[in-house]
Image (spheres, rainbow, N blue to C red):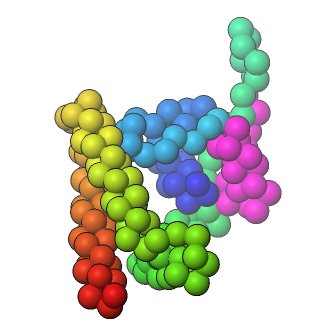
Amino acid sequence: MRLPLLALLARGPAHGYELKQDLEQLLGSAYPQPNVGQIYVTLGRLEKSGLIEGEDVTQSSRPNKKVYHLTEAGREALRVWFEEPEDEPRVRDEFFMKLALAPQTGLADQISLINQQRRQYLNTMRQLSRLAAAEDRDNRIAHLLIEGAMLHLQADLDWLERCQEELEESE
């Protein structure tokens, strides 16, 4: 959450609730929506670390609000973030750990685990399809997010098929 908030502040000052709304509007309903409390906690941490500065703004008819802006250190942190490619191979996969350890425990059957996971992925794909249909057509970012998630799920389904074939051959 840290760097996405910094990125939103790069275009100009904003308060926490405004940042939450901007994230929701940008990413659409497929992305897990942060709660406003999480946003304010993160803003507090960013301020303590010197990446943003907050300024209290007095409002006559409402409680005061704090508007944040990016510092030079925050801008530099964003530059570094954008320059570094993401390197997160999925070798620490929780499902794979279950699949690998199931035979040793005697508590779960590997093929049953695969079938259960396949059902979960298919249900998630159906949910994403409904979200895509309901999402504003002009929100290209949200549609790209949904499409990326569906492509990852399809790859996961293909991988489950491969696991099942391999395990059935070894029996």
Which residue appears at 27% of the width and 88% of the height?
169
At a point 69% along the width and 50% down the height, the residue shown is 42
- Picture coordinates of residue 93 (x, y %)? 49, 74
Residue 26, compared with residue 169, is above or below; it is: above
Which residues, given as a range, are shown in magenta? 37-57
Picture quarter with the N terminus: bottom right
- Residue 52 within the segment the image draws in magenta: yes
Question: Which quadrant holds residue 14?
Answer: top right
Q: In this view, does 47 lie to the left or right of 108?
A: right
- In which quarter of the view is residue 24 placed? top left
Say which of 131 and 119 sits in front.
Answer: 119
For residue 28, above or below residue 163: above
What residue is drawn where x is 35% and y is 62%?
Answer: 115
Residue 76 drawn at (x, y percent): 57, 70
57 vs 12, left or right, is right
Relative to residue 140, is residue 52 drawn left or right? Answer: right
Residue 151 in which image quadrant: bottom left
Q: Which of 3 and 102 is in front in this view?
A: 102
Residue drawn at 31 percent across, 71 percent down: 160
For the C terminus, give its image quadrant: bottom left
Image location (x, y in percent) of residue 152: 30, 64
